[in-house]
């Protein structure tokens, strides 16, 4: 096994524990929204994208219909377009193999694999996704069976897990002072767009702040 | 039934979105200017995720107990405390503030 892949496995463990908490609240909310435990678990296994799963189940559960729920979930995933283009030159093999390696792009793995110079350690990225996938699916199992007895997971403060998860990843990026200004700009663009665009779009649009890289 | 269709469709769109960059860009070296832009994407996208997941609910901006939890977490992350300790503290702070307000 590649040394980077092993380092990735280890680096992914803390994020998999946090992911467990996050997917547990997903499991609870999905069951409360009218999904069966099996549906919640299968969804985590085949989608494995937190924000998309929360958005799509909330909309379908509220009677929003099939197309709007799939669209909202896909929009939450739109950031993976930017992340996929970013890692593309660091992947190896033919189109099929690259497409498969691209499936291991999840936010923590992508951020951990970032080498700061525009390149990515693909072995580390793939390794870091393995424990996170296990944590994600098992957390959903726990949440789905807690389901209706758990009450509102927000009451237990579990909604804070998601932003703190991303804040920890962001903090590592901000150790480079050149990142701070653009991060702030991205945050402001995203907040400014929230009232005017569907959820998911503000994050993708914030990516335009990275264009200041053209001037450097 | 609709739930299964949604799960299947979302699995397919997610896989396509993740495959798009790797297949389209393939093994080509990107021009140096593009590389500079890419190097700035992680802090930008992560910052946007932090603020939108803390301060918005659908298309509405709002400040609630989770903002207090995130603020406490920010200080703890800056002091380099372990992630799991940070997350559990933030959860307790958020639940506490929510219970009191």
Image: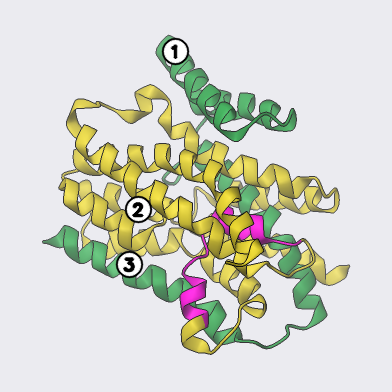
Colour-to-chain, yellow:
A
User: Is label 1 on the same chain as label 2?
Assistant: no
Extreme left residue here?
B1
Q: Which mark is residue B11?
A: 3
Q: The C terminus of chain B lies in which quarter of the figure?
A: top left
- Residue at x-position 59% and y-position 42%: B51
Secondary structure type for disc 2: helix
- Residue at x-position 51% and y-position 88%: A95
Q: In the figure, is residue A63 to the left or right of B86? A: left
> Which mark is first along the chain, 1 or 3?
3
Check the residue under mark 2 and report the chain it is in. A
Give the Cα distance between marks 3 and 1: 39 Å
**Image-quadrant location for residue A47:** bottom left
**Colour displayed for chain B in the image of the structure:** green
| Span colored in magenta | A98-115
Residue at numbered disc 2? A53
Q: Could you say which is closer to the camera, residue B2 or residue A117?
A: A117
Residue at numbered disc 1? B101
Check the residue under mark 3 and report the chain it is in. B
Secondary structure type for disc 1: loop
Residue A30 position within the rendered picture, expressed as x and y whole percent measured from the top left: 25, 44
Residue A35 position within the rendered picture, expressed as x and y whole percent measured from the top left: 17, 48
Extreme right residue here?
A216
Q: Main secondary structure of the magenta part?
A: helix
Q: Could you say which is closer to the camera, residue A108 or residue A80?
A: A108
Q: Do the residues under discs 3 and 1 have CB atoms within 8 angstroms?
A: no
Residue B9 position within the rendered picture, expressed as x and y whole percent measured from the top left: 27, 69
Give the Cα distance between marks 1 and 2: 29 Å
């Amino acid at each position: 096994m590649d040394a980077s892949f092993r380092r990735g496995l280890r680096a992914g463990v803390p994020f998999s524990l946090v992911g467990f908490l996050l997917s547990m609240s997903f499991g609870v909310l999905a069951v409360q929204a009218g999904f069966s435990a099996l549906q919640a678990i299968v969804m985590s296994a085949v989608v494995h994208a937190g924000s998309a799963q929360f958005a799509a189940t909330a909309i379908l559960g509220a009677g929003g219909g099939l197309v709007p729920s799939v669209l909202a979930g896909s929009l939450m995933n739109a950031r993976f377009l930017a992340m996929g283009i970013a890692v593309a030159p660091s992947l190896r093999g033919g189109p099929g193999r690259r497409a498969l390696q691209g499936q291991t792009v999840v936010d923590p793995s992508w951020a951990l694999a970032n080498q700061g110079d525009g390149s990515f350690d693909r072995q580390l990225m793939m390794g870091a996704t393995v424990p996170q996938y296990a944590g994600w699916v098992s957390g959903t199992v726990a949440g789905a069976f807690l389901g209706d007895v758990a009450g509102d997971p927000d009451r237990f403060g579990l909604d804070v897990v998601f932003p703190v998860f991303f804040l920890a990843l962001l903090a590592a990026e901000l150790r480079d002072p050149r990142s701070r200004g653009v991060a702030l700009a991205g945050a402001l663009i995203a907040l400014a767009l929230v009232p005017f665009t569907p959820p998911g779009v503000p994050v993708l649009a914030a990516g335009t702040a990275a264009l200041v890289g053209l001037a450097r | 039934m609709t739930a299964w269709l949604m799960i299947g469709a979302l699995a397919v769109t997610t896989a396509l979105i993740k495959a798009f960059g790797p297949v389209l860009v393939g093994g080509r070296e990107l021009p140096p200017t593009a590389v500079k832009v890419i190097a700035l994407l992680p802090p930008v996208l992560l910052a946007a995720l932090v603020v939108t997941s803390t301060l918005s609910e659908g298309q509405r901006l709002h400040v609630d107990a989770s903002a207090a939890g995130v603020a406490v977490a920010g200080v703890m992350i800056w002091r380099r405390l372990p992630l799991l300790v940070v997350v559990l503290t933030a959860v307790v702070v958020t639940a506490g503030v929510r219970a009191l307000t």
